[in-house]
Image: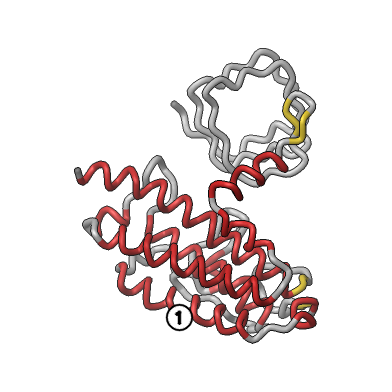
Amino acid sequence: MSNERSQEASTTRLEDADFSGVRLHGPNFENTVITDGWFLNADFSGDVGGLRVNGVEVLPLIEAELNRRWPGRASLRATDPKVLTQAWSMLEGIWLSTISRAGALPETWLHERVNEEWSFLETLRHLIMATDCWHGRMIKGEPHPYHAWGLAGPFLNDPESLGLDLSATPSLDEVLAVRQGRFADVGMTIASLSMSDLERVCHPPSTPGHPQVPHTVLHCLHVILNEEWEHNRYANRDLDVLVERSR
């Protein structure tokens, strides 16, 4: 299978295209219309909103099922400081369990990418970056919040300008030391919040970085909580593959 990147098809009409067996990473289907498609045994993951399948908007159905499977998940969208504190405590618990699973494997495996996704250590480094963006830069207003080991997605065109070291290969213990400090910092912020604090609008510093537009504290926290939850899910998905290998 060929590996092609950044293929623009925004004005294209595809007739009877065969995508069977193809793996798409990071595609953008915003405002895409698919008619008479075949999705037998297809597996989708990503941000979903306004998606209709055979005339039915599926997001409410997906959200209800995910919340049924993981009752604590609904607290990630809480608007009350006390519930947000509970959500953060829940995330701390599931990450402790996940890190314990990872620690039982050879560390070299934690540098490996499963199915071309981020490795376990890359996932932790991305969460460091997400915290620096949405907590350090936005909520705390720090002009230069980025740790050199942070790992950004493709939305960041010039990561080196922020001081990120893309060639770094820190160990699990080194990454965890940074990660735990960031995690505790967010926890202290959440624990100190009032309802009025959540409504405060955060204006990003004028220095280069992400985000670049204002957001409320509540929005920033929701992004952080969602990042923590989703990437824990991805990490455990890939750990399942690595654990099976160890057997």
At a point 47% along the width and 70% down the height, the residue shown is 92
Query: In the picture provided, is 105 more to the left or to the right than 140?
Result: left
Query: In the picture provided, is 52 more to the left or to the right than 119?
Result: right
In this rendering, the answer to whether 152 lies above or below 21 is below
| Quarter holding residue 29 | top right
User: Could you say which is closer to the camera, residue 205 or residue 29?
Assistant: 29
Crowding at mark 1 (Cα within 10 Å: few <14, some 14-19, many 20+): few
Query: In the picture provided, is 33 more to the left or to the right than 42?
Result: right
Q: Amino acid at mark 1?
A: Gly
Q: Locate the N terminus and report the quarter of the image it occupies.
A: top left
In this rendering, the answer to whether 84 lies above or below 46 is below
**Relative image position of residue 56 (x, y in whole percent):** 77, 30
At a point 26% along the width and 42% down the height, the residue shown is 244
Q: Give the residue at the far left of this rendering.
A: 247
At a point 64% along the width and 71% down the height, the residue shown is 83
- Residue at label 1? 181
**Relative image position of residue 96 (x, y in whole percent):** 39, 67
